[in-house]
Image: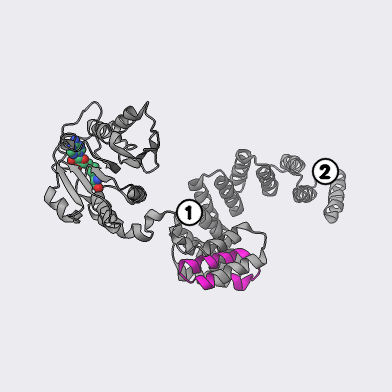
Amino acid sequence: MELINSELDEARQAAERSPTDQRVMGTLASLLQKNGDFEQAEQVCRRWIELVPAGPGAHAGLVSCLAQQGRLDEAIEAVQRAIEIAPDHAQFQAQLGHLLLRKNDRRSAEQAYRFAIARAPDTPTFHSALAHCLSQQGRVGEAVSSAQRAVEINPDNFHFKLQLANLLLLGGDLSGAEQAFRRAIALAPDVPAAHAGLGSCLTKQGREGEAVAAVQRAIEIAPDNAHYRNQLRALSIPDRDLYRPLFSPWLGSGEFREVYQRAAPRSLVDPTRCYVLYALAKQALHLGGEYWECGVYKGGTAAMIAEILSRYNGPQLRLFDTFAGMPETDTSRDLHKAGDFADTSLNAVRQHVGHERLVSYHEGFIPDTFGGLEGSSIAFAHVDVDIYQSVLDCCEFIFPRLMQGGFMVFDDYGFPSCPGARAAVDGFFQGTSAFPLVLSTGQAAVFKSLG
Ligand SMILES: C[S@@+](CC[C@H](N)C(=O)[O-])C[C@H]1O[C@@H](n2cnc3c(N)ncnc32)[C@H](O)[C@@H]1O
């Protein structure tokens, strides 16, 4: 700093003595920038441009002063003027690329980098910048090629190697990435990012022990880095592949993975919603009441619930459907039509669901098929009937018979294709003690609590 201050004083005096000397102005502007005094540096650059309007150095200085002050639009205008003056100057094109990227205009930035590369094809930083820009657009394969070009031109540069390694990892080329991380480490053994990256790469290959060692090395080098510490902590979670980034057991955790296999081939209900059913169906087991499903179609979710009940010696499962498609719908409230979901049959469902001892079938129209079941105590009900009147009929019959501690899950509540389902749930529960819990899956759940 001392050195810069004395150099700055000298440059200021020189500028006073020779106010029209371009070299002196260039030195003063660059020292002011180094010193972080961007406003003064900007003024010097502007004076310099007045003196030499076509001087690329003065324009480059002004662009970088404006960019440092966050005045990106003015910086872009300035660099565009510089490009008009010196169209073959590749560095201006690259500078324009950096500025456009900062403004998230990735397509235009890419174009600018490509212009820079066309003018100076052997400048590795241009290829590296293009790689960064392409990866930001999700074009990982192309980004890898650009990063590879930068490495080819300058094989001894650590940053290019690390960039290539990270991109290979992102693209899923784990052995290529590992090799690149190791080469980067050979070039700069004390940079923690490369060890941490190698750790991620080894983790993805299932080589936990080596991964731990690599991340520990990153922590040794940068003990205060919270990211590396978290990375090491995450390595001790046995099912960490289910963190995306949060724990997502519906991707295939333990017992759920097995029981979901019963639903998957014959259900419209995706794994996240099936997981909600699985968790609440298990939670209601201790109540000892009946399980109901209204809306069975091909028997996907029914088979999953039956499987859960059979594993835990659970109670009876009652399944309600026409098994021949939707009844008449209310076109002012519903988007579904009579006859939707007709490509099924009771026999096919019975064969798929199995567990005959546990399951009973109520074929026909809801609520007619509820007749005779007024004395039921229901622990869990999955309501997946999609249309206003059917959902409302389910609410009216089931909720008064739902046991304390029991659940109703409405599959279609939040789906724009089923506006009637939401209207029925909202209308029915308004003014009751229950309040539907709307889930990000599209479902809504109602809990029967005490009182
Ligand atoms: C979306 S499907 C059920 C999907 C099923 N849970 C699964 O795992 O894919 C809706 C079902 O509700 C049935 N349904 C709707 N209203 C009904 C009613 N009033 N009576 C009987 N079945 C009805 C239809 O026949 C259809 O099979």
**Residue 302: percent from left, percent from top:** 24, 49
Q: Give the range drawn in magenta.
A: 185-211
Q: Which residue is drawn at the image coordinates 57% and 46% (left, top)?
A: 102
Quadrant position of residue 440: top left
Residue 352 within the segment the image draws in magenta = no
Depth check, front residue: 257 or 4 = 257
255 vs 79, left or right, is left
**Residue ID for mark 1:** 245
Q: Is residue 301 left or right of residue 77?
A: left
* Residue 58, disc: none
Q: Which residue: 66% across, 67% down?
A: 220
SS at mark 2? Answer: loop
Magenta: main secondary structure: helix
Residue 270's spot in the image, x, y percent?
31, 49
Q: Where residue 322 appears, x then y in whole percent?
A: 15, 41
Residue indicated by mark 2: 19
Q: Nearer the viewer, mark 1 or mark 2?
A: 1
Q: How crowded is mark 1: few (under 14 residues within 10 Å), some or many (20 or more)?
A: few
Pointer 2 local density, CA inside 10 Å: few below 14, some 14–19, many at least 20: some
Mark found first going from the N terminus, 1 or 2: 2
Magenta span contains residue 199: yes
